[in-house]
Image: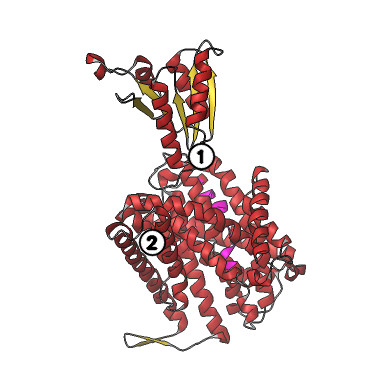
Amino acid sequence: MLGSWLWILAMGFFVGQIVGRLGMPPLLGMILVGILLREVLSPEVLAAAGDLRLVAVAIILMKAGLGLDREKLAQQGSVALRLGFLPAACEAVAVALLSRWILGLDWDWETGLLLGCVIGAESPAVIVPGMLRLKSLGWGVAKGIPDAILTGSALSDVLMLLGFSLLLSLLGQGSTENVRLLGLELSPLQWLPFQVGMEILLGVAIGYLAARVLVALLVQQNWTRNSTQEVLLAACLALGLVLAPQVWPYFSGYLAVMAMGFFLIELDGPLARRLRVGFDALWTVAEIVLFVLLGASLDLQVLGSLILPGLLLLTLSLLLGRGLGWWLSTLGSNWNWRERLFLLPGNMAKATVQAAIGGIPLAQGIPGGETILALAALSILTTAPLGAWLTQVCAPRLLEKGEVDPTKVGSQGRVSFLAAVDTSPLAEAVLRKVADLARRVDGEVIVLHVTDEPQGKGVEELQQLTQRLLADIRHQFCLASGPLAETIVTLAQERQVTDIVIGKRGHRGWEQVLVGSTSQAVLETSPIPVILVELTRSS
């Protein structure tokens, strides 16, 4: 098993990076690795693939909840709600109708709708990372488009999974008993709307209670000593919520996890920020495991002669069925036609749910089960990588860029600082300060010295001081000439640093209320935050 995990993590990471540098989504490379490693991985790892995928889904759903914006959801609440039901339902119906004509199969409407529920479900494992990345870059945030898609994706899975379970029952694979409600006897089909509402309401309520429990344990009772323990406890609770419906199937575990992350932002912002950083780190590993095992679970032999008609079915149901659902979902909203068009790539990906339920009809002996499994695999292979890639390509062309709310997204990329120093004793204080800041966030440091004498003795001593104080930090020493303040600000903008760290002068008499002339000029002209460092008397 250890060898299998080495192959999964190492190959998944490197191939994903290679594919990403070629301009395609890294998950495509990870899925490819899974397909290639299928015969190499140990049977124990493949047998645990379903459970491991659930762990990864719990992590990504928690990330989604911690990234939701209440104000944007309130602004687009009706759109998010409609996105949760209409596109998936319309696509499921379109699949049921078109499959009889395109595939030439003479199956009853229940089997067609069963296939529709499998195909219509959306993949949080693909959609959530894409939407969170758009939020971090500011695309569509002014109108809350990523938030609406995130919420709608979670709701649509509730509907499709419930419909799938009901149709299995109607096909003779489960209980078909009627349900009594307030003295009325309801058929399983009549009971479905009540069950959907109950799962959504209980999912939100349980998510709120879970968030309350986390705040009580981690903040009020101080059960943990560091952020790593906080993330561990939150991850266990998230996984428990995902697994709980297997024992008590009256609420949506997916929705409960997202709700827990959402309510944590409202209940305790600092805790939510710490958990967001931790779940970002967990997703780095979980993403590789999820998509490599997804590729390893695909059986390409079942596709056979269904590739061309299957692609035609998926394309038409996406454009006609889901397209109608998208139009109805955004009807009357403030979305323009470009933003509505963005739903095509942003809301099309299928992967996790299809991998989880695509093989159940075949395993339970449903006629046409092998066809359902093949089309589920085909939908994963086509829509998951295509949707992830088109989301990032189309966002700058179809969405407007707005201001990023740093309280709702994790930090993207490596944090970097520009330390502007001279050869005075103040340089050591500046370097010590920037070293402390960089160690806190695992950041990089650019040390800038502006001088007209690059070969002077002071420069060599400054380089040695930099090497000594920043020995455990990734740093770069730069020399430049020109006007001090202008050179500092220009380089900071070119390197896109997070903050500028510079010394503040003035320690005697009236000079104590003044800032050094260079520092003052940087403060006045820099669009980047500036941190001033004073030379203490003990220094």
From what the image shows, is residue 196 above or below residue 61? below
Q: Amino acid at mark 1?
A: Arg
Residue 26 circle label: none
Image point 39% across, 20% down: which residue? 425
Q: Where does the image place residue 407, in percent across and percent down from the top left?
A: 37, 46
- Residue pointed to by mark 1: 414
Disc 1 + disc 2, Cβ < 8 Å: no
Residue at the outermost front position: 538
Between residue 220 and residue 453, name the one nearer to us.
453
Distance (Cα) linking label 1 and label 2: 29 Å
Please indicate, yes or no, whether residue 413 appears anywhere in the rendered image. yes
Magenta region, main secondary structure: helix
Residue range of the region highlighted in magenta in the rendering = 339-354
Q: Where does the image place residue 390, in percent across and percent down from the top left?
A: 60, 48
Image point 70% across, 71% down: which residue? 103
From what the image shows, is residue 224 above or below residue 517? below
Left or right? Give the position of 28 relative to 214.
Answer: right
Q: Amino acid at mark 2?
A: Ala
Image point 64% across, 80% down: which residue? 363
> Circle 2: is it few (<14), some (14-19), or many (20+) Cα within 10 Å?
many
- Look at the image and tell me in which quarter the N terminus lies: bottom right
- Look at the image and tell me in which quarter the C terminus lies: top left
- Residue pointed to by mark 2: 259
Between residue 275 and residue 323, name the one nearer to us.
275
Please indicate, yes or no, whether residue 153 appears anywhere in the rendered image. no
Q: Where does the image place residue 55, in percent across and percent down from the top left?
A: 52, 65
Mark 1 against mark 2, which lies toward the viewer?
1
Magenta-span inclusion, residue 313: no
